[in-house]
Each structure stands twice: as C-alpha cells, then as structure tokens.
Image (spheres, grey):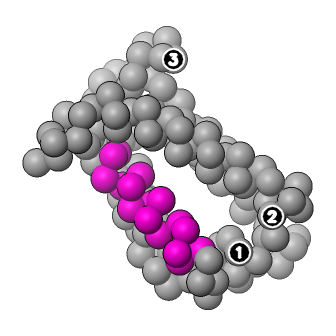
Amino acid sequence: MLNFIPKRFAIHLLLLLFTAVMLFHLLVMLGVIPFEIVWGGRLTREKMIQFESASLLLNGVMLTVIGIYAGYVNLNVNPKILKGALWIMVALFFLNTLGNLYSNNDLEKIIFTPVTMLLTVFCLRLAMD
C-alpha cells in the first residue's frame, strides 16, 4: 500500500523529524519558544515542564525504536516487539494528528498537524513492511 515511499527515505525522515521535535521541546522547556503554542495552549507553566519532559522521553524512545529498526542502534530486540512498537507509534501519531486539529492555537494546527500526519504515514510504512 505505502510501498511507493522508499523504506530508507521513511527511516531517515523519521530520524530527522524525531530529532527536530526533541530539539523543539527542549527549546520550549528552556523558554526560548513560548509554551502557549504547545499542548493545545491549555497548560500552565508548571504543568508544561512535566508534559515537555514526558514528550522528550517518549520521543527519545521512538527515536531509538527507529534507530534499532534501521540498524543504527545495535540492540537485540525481538522483531515482533519492534513491529508492535511501530504500530503503537502509528496509533499515537494518528491520535495526535486529530488532537492537533482541535488545538486552541492556530500555529500548532498549521505546523504540527502536517508533522504528525507525516510521522503517522512514515511509521505506517515501516510497520507494514
């Protein structure tokens, strides 16, 4: 179905996107980027640190999953577990895309809806392989 997307292209774009998203969340935590443009604009400053920390951790795990899948991270993981992780990522990014569509912040809608949609499609490409 998604075989028109080259697997290596999907892998490298996912690695790039996860790295960029992690940098973005770090900049939000540091106050360089206003926290009001994330999490639907619904967080207080105190909650933002908790949510951004969780996001950094989760994105780091997903970056590692893609790194293992690509053979860049040398960990012996059962292929079924790896495939299961990819399917969980597909579901997570699909739901995140829907959540971004309902954000109170227009910038979040415009920028992150397409990003999470791409993450969904590229993770789906790998999960279906």
Give amino acid for label 3: Val
Q: Is residue 2 left or right of residue 91?
A: left
Who is closer to the viewer here, 5 or 120? Answer: 5
Query: Which portion, as a residue range, is magenta?
Result: 108-123
> Which numbered disc covers residue 37?
1
Q: Residues within 10 Å of mark 3 (few under 14, many from 20)?
A: few
Please give the name of the residue rendered at 61% of the width and 40% of the height, measured from the top-left corner.
Answer: 19
Foreground label between 3 and 1: 1
Which amino acid lies under the numbered mark 1 shown in the image of this protein? Ile
From the viewer's perspective, tell me whether residue 97 is left or right of residue 7.
Answer: right
Residue drawn at x 34%, y 34% as measured from the top left: 9
Q: Is residue 104 above or below residue 77?
A: below
Hey, which quadrant is residue 39 in on the image? bottom right
What percent of the width, then of the height, locates residue 123? Answer: 34, 45
Amino acid at the residue labelled 2? Ile
Mark number displayed over residue 33? 2
Q: Gap between marks 3 and 1, in whole Å? A: 33 Å
The reply to whether discs 1 and 2 touch (Cβ–Cβ < 8 Å) is: yes
Left or right: where 52 falls relative to 82: right
* Disc nearest the viewer among 2 and 3: 2
Q: Is residue 95 left or right of residue 31?
A: left
Q: Secondary structure at mark 1?
A: helix
Instruction: Determine which residue is flagged by label 3.
Output: 73
Q: Main secondary structure of the magenta part?
A: helix
Distance from Cα at disc 1 to Cα at disc 2: 8 Å
**Secondary structure of the residue carrying numbered label 3:** loop
Looking at marks 2 and 3 on the same chain, the residue that comes earlier in the sequence is marked by 2
Q: Position of residue 81 (x, y in %)?
A: 35, 31
- On screen, 49 above or below 82? below
C-alpha gap between disc 2 and disc 3: 31 Å
- Magenta stretch: includes residue 119: yes
